[in-house]
Amino acid sequence: MNLIYKIYRKIQQHLKKWQKSLYTERLWKEKKSDVTRWKQKSSLFSNWDDRTQMLAAKITENSTVLEFGAGRLVLKEMLPKGCTYIPSDIVARSEDTLVIDLNQEALPRLPITDYVVFSGVLEYVFDVQKVLAHCASTTRQLLFSYATIESYGHIKDRRYNGWVSDLSEITLIRVCKELGFSVEKFETWKGQSLYQCKKIE
């Protein structure tokens, strides 16, 4: 009986993974964001905070910081003194949240900032180059994490995670350099690479 239960559980796990991958594939074909997922607080995990802290450590005092995918707003509490924090997300996380869907065709004008931060966000963006280019004219630095295909190479696993972009490290670095940034990979978190991109004056 125990063996039968284990087999049943294994089948259920594979079925759930297959269904979730198919759902992401449908979103990918329609070029739509998974708003339903991000409306649920249960989709925001506290174990992501370490990644955010690593990015926050690169921010200097008295800076203006725009965070996409603000989620639980933990970056605000991690910033050094004197910083101004501007949260943005696909759904409102606070009264002052800039509600922006990064997968929409026309992106709104952004405020001038010292830093733009993406912690676990760009994997859910269809056109990463377009989004980074949109930010490039309004900020001095980009701080972001990304699960490159070198570390996460199985497309079906990426779709199971809800990820819709599949970039290599070489492509990411090239895109940022073409936008006028110097690029440093300064840390990794659970196989994801963390980058600091500074505008070349």
Image (spheres, rainbow, N blue to C red):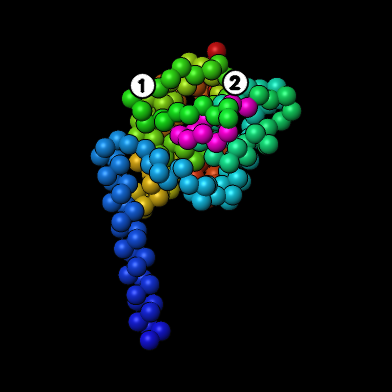
Please give the name of the residue rendered at 30% of the width and 42% of the height, measured from the top-left corner. Answer: 27
Which residue in the protein does label 2 denote?
Answer: 114
When the figure is inspected, residue 110 is found, relative to residue 28, above or below; the finding is above
Asked if 8 appears above or below 119 in the picture, the reply is below
Q: Amino acid at mark 2?
A: Asp
Q: Quick check: marks 2 and 1 in contact, CB under 8 Å? A: no
Q: Nearer the viewer, residue 199 or 37?
A: 37
Q: Which mark is residue 145?
A: none
In 3D space, how far apart are the residues under numbered discs 2 and 1 (Cα atoms)? 23 Å
Image coordinates for residue 171, horizontal then vertical, percent = 38, 32
Q: Three-letter amino acid code at disc 1?
A: Ala
| 2 or 1: mark nearer the eye | 1
Q: Nearer the viewer, residue 168 or 119?
A: 119
Which residues fall within the magenta stretch?
85-94
Position above or below: 52 against 184: below
Is residue 86 one of those drawn in magenta?
yes
Q: Which quadrant is the N terminus positioned in? A: bottom left
Q: Residue furthest front?
A: 95
Q: For the point 33% across and 25% down, which residue is it? A: 105
Location of residue 52 by image quarter: top right
Q: Which mark is residue 106?
A: 1
